[in-house]
Image (cartoon, rainbow, N blue to C red):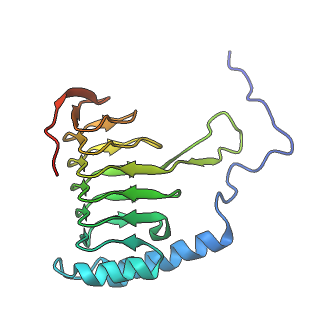
Amino acid sequence: MSRALPVHSGAQSFGAPQYSLGNRVRRQLWSAAWIFLFRPSPRIAHAWRGRLLRIFGASLGPGCRIYPGARIWAPWNLTCEDHVWVADGAELYNPAPMLLRSHAIVSQGAYLCGATHDYNDPAFPVLSFPMQLGRYAWVAARAIVSPGVSLGDGAVLGLGSLATKDLEPWSIYAGVPACKLKARNPIG
């Protein structure tokens, strides 16, 4: 026998917008710029894509390489220090600030997830978290970083792995969920 789900009077509708009108308009403008200007740009046009990201509020240091197939949800919440690389197919879902420190790398198909939903609230509101990749950190191909998880300096998240907790500096992690495998020699 199934139980009826409780009815919550006065609760925000399940389908109500999670973001302000201004945020939604900015994301639509960014989506159009991504489709028509960012995505079709030549692979070597890093300066062009950097300029577009800066127009939409991103802060990028020198030597950053954001490839044309990279997806960035909210450029205005993205800060990249110098020589950060974000590969084709990488996705940065960043409704909250996301900081990629110097020489951080996000490889092909990697997903940095900066939000989830409050599943205990009938309105299912978005819960967003700031995230950070430390200096020389590397998120390998098809790896996933869960909401609010940060990587310490030099941390490596291996191919196809899932980080569900912060990764210690200069350590290599792999698996689902990711477990620490060994230490990495510090760089710089």
Does residue 25 appear in the picture of this structure?
yes
Tell me where residue 81 appears, x and y as whole percent.
33, 64
Image quadrant where residue 100 sits: bottom left
Q: Residue at x 35, y 72 (%)?
A: 60
Q: Residue at x 42, y 41 (%)?
A: 149
Tell me where residue 23 appears, x and y as whole percent.
60, 70
Q: Residue furthest top?
A: 1
Q: Residue at x 23, y 58 (%)?
A: 103
Q: Indicate whether 56 appears above or below 161.
A: below
**Residue closer to the observer: 21 or 134:** 134
**Residue closer to the observer: 139 or 126:** 139
Image quadrant where residue 106 sits: bottom left
* Direction from residue 121 to residue 155 in the image, left or right: left
The quadrant in which the N terminus is found is top right
Tell me where residue 54 appears, x and y as whole percent.
41, 79
Does residue 73 appear in the picture of this structure?
no
Q: Indicate whether 178 appears above or below 16.
A: above
Tally the numbered discs: 0
**Residue closer to the observer: 97 or 188:** 188
Image quadrant where residue 180 sits: top left
Q: Residue furthest right?
A: 9
Tell me where residue 45 appears, x and y as whole percent.
21, 82
Q: Residue furthest left?
A: 185
